[in-house]
Amino acid sequence: MNPGCPNSECHSFQKNNFCKKDGHYIRKDDSRKIQRYKCSACSKKFSRATGTLEFRQKKRRINHTIFKILSSGVSMRRSAIIVGVHRTTIDRKLIYLAQKSRQMHAELLLKIGTQKVERLQFDDLITTEHTKLKPLSVSVAVDAQSRTILGAFVSQIPAFGHLAALSRRKYGKRRNFHRESMVKLFQEIAPVVSPFAEIKSDEHKLYKEVVQDYFPNAIYKQYKGEKAMIAGLGELKKNGRDPLFAINHTCAMLRANINRLFRRTWCTTKRPKRLEDHLAIYIAFHNSILLN
Ligand SMILES: [Zn+2]
């Protein structure tokens, strides 16, 4: 089928009744033959590539490789060396792959929405923005049955514990956006979770309220935080039976496979937005490749 006219001023915009084949070109980048078209209503010429996320990319061949290695614990700079491109290219690919991954995720959520999630678990994972004095919280929700990651949102939180005073002195008061990101997360997952689902989490003070707002009829259970199995591996718990195993294991996988979430790493997030992009890529990889 011919694609529709991309010209928004044309009277047959996005319709293909006036679109005719109009030759082709060989795309140098991946040696594919690309069909060109012409809309005879407005004389606009375009091709199969017009309007795609990859439009005008010069290095399409490496997209899938970068998708996989950025989801496998490799740093941005090291990916550039492995693939043989400039690190700026990796920066741009991260943004493109995040867009692509969000599309994949939206399609997946539509699919899940028809069956509904019956067992939901969620939690927060703490990481930093360049320094420990600027912590970030990543709110993650997972389907405990299939282990599908349903969503993850990053929020700025103030420093806590013995770093709180130092952080305030050095960087001033740091606002807390945790509630906003919890709301974003629940807004995203509400359509795919059954209103009578079984929901589990730890005893964070904010959680009860948010669950009440979005799932007043759910069976909500909160559990006390357990001791970690190995020092430094906070997500994997000591006791044999962890009621929050699905979410804890998923968070451990995020830490193991997203380089900037490693503990004791040289690589840190410089911009929270990019962490969210990186999470989107990992989620698409996790749900589409690891779970299949
Ligand atoms: Zn047209």
Image (spheres, rainbow, N blue to C red):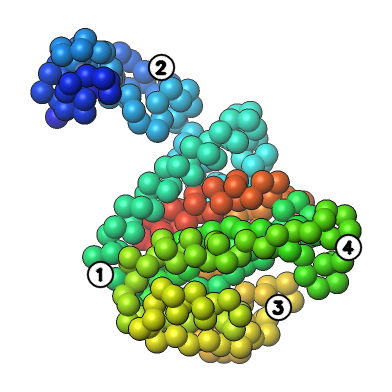
The label nearer to you, 3 versus 1, is 1
Residue 165 lies, in percent from the top left, at: 87, 66
Where disc 2 sits, the SS reads loop
| Cα–Cα gap, marks 3 and 2 | 51 Å
The verdict on label 1 being within 8 Å of ligand 1 is: no
Amino acid identity at mark 2: Lys
Q: Which residue is identified by label 4? A: 166
Please state which amino acid type lies under the numbered disc 1. Gln
Per the image, the residue denoted by label 2 is 28
Give the residue pinned by disc 3: 230
- CA gap, disc 3 and disc 1: 37 Å
Q: Could you tell me which quadrant the C terminus lies in? A: bottom left
Q: Earlier in the sequence, mark 4 or mark 2?
A: 2
Question: Compared with residue 133, is residue 14 higher up or lower down, i.e. above or below?
Answer: above
Residue type at mark 3? Ile
Query: Residue 57 appears at what percent x and percent y?
Result: 46, 25
Q: Earlier in the sequence, mark 3 or mark 1?
A: 1
Quarter-of-image position of residue 288: bottom left
Q: Is residue 215 above or below residue 73?
A: below
Circle 1 residue: 115
Element assignment for label 1: loop
Q: Earlier in the sequence, mark 3 or mark 4?
A: 4
Relative height, residue 12 to residue 284 (above, below): above
Question: Which mark is in front, 2 or 1?
Answer: 1
Callout 3: 10 Å neighbours few (<14), some, many (20+)? few
Q: Look at 30% across and 13% down and name the residue there.
A: 25
